[in-house]
């Protein structure tokens, strides 16, 4: 085998090794780190301990997998606060911890952010700051996908429960343009109703 062919062969071997390392090994290692963190989290006693455990996962470099870790962890946090298993200050700190990790153009992340703050708002005194954050996330998602049912229904429901009947009515009219047979929304055209819609 000529020297040129040997060089090309070693280049191909090196490139293949790097490809496997970045596209397979690092994502696998990151997913394992996340699974181990979830197991550890079952025995944690404070938000600081929670942060220390999951910081290691977020700081673990991988070109693939970060978006998925945020999706799964944010859903876990949402489930936790939805079930009322944590006090308000703990729930808020958990939400504030995961927030900076959201991908701004990721619809799922933005919807989860909206639902987190909507849950905080409905469960903890209907504080205006929580409502505003939920609305902010819904509007960001609306800008990305204005015809997505979870966004339209979620935002309409948020406005309805907040008493913003004009905004809820406008969204109901918009939704009915896309899905004219949705009878659940027709009462909203004669607000204020005593109904709640769901997607």
Image (tube, rainbow, N blue to C red):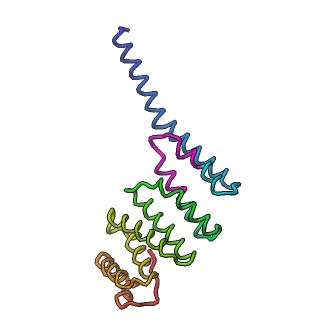
Q: Nearer the viewer, residue 166 or 197?
A: 166
Magenta segment range? Answer: 54-74
Image quarter in which the N terminus is found:
top left
| Residue 26 spot, x, y in % from top left | 51, 38
| Image spot of residue 58 (x, y percent) | 53, 46
Q: Residue at x 35, y 13 (%)?
A: 5
Q: Is residue 152 above or below residue 60?
A: below
Q: Nearer the viewer, residue 132 or 157?
A: 132
Report if residue 67 lies within the magenta region. yes
Left or right: where 183 falls relative to 61: left
Rendering coords of residue 10 (x, y %): 41, 18
Where is 21 relative to 194, above or below? above
Q: Residue furthest top?
A: 2
Q: Is residue 41 left or right of residue 4?
A: right
Q: How many marks?
A: 0
Task: Tell whether position 140 is magenta.
Answer: no
Please report the residue visible at 46 percent of the width from the left and 27 percent of the height from the top.
17
Which residue of the protein is positioned furthest toward the left in this rendering?
A: 177
């Amino acid at each position: 085998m000529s020297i040129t062919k040997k060089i090309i062969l070693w280049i191909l071997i090196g490139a293949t090794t790097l490809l496997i390392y970045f596209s397979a090994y690092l994502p696998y290692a990151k997913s394992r780190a996340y699974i181990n963190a979830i197991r550890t989290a079952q025995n944690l006693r404070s938000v600081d301990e929670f942060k220390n455990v999951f910081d290691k996962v977020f700081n673990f470099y991988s070109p693939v997998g970060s978006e998925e870790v945020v999706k799964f962890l944010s859903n876990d946090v949402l489930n936790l606060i939805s079930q009322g298993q944590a006090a308000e200050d703990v729930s808020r700190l958990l939400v504030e911890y995961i927030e900076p990790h959201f991908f701004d153009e990721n619809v799922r992340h933005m919807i989860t952010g909206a639902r987190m703050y909507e849950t905080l708002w409905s469960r903890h005194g209907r504080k205006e700051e929580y409502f505003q954050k939920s609305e902010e996330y819904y509007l960001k998602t609306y800008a990305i996908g204005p015809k997505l049912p979870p966004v339209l229904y979620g935002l309409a429901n948020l406005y309805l429960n907040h008493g913003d009947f004009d905004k809820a009515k406008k969204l109901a009219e918009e939704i009915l343009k896309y899905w004219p047979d949705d009878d659940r929304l027709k009462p909203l055209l004669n607000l204020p109703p005593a109904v709640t819609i769901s997607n």
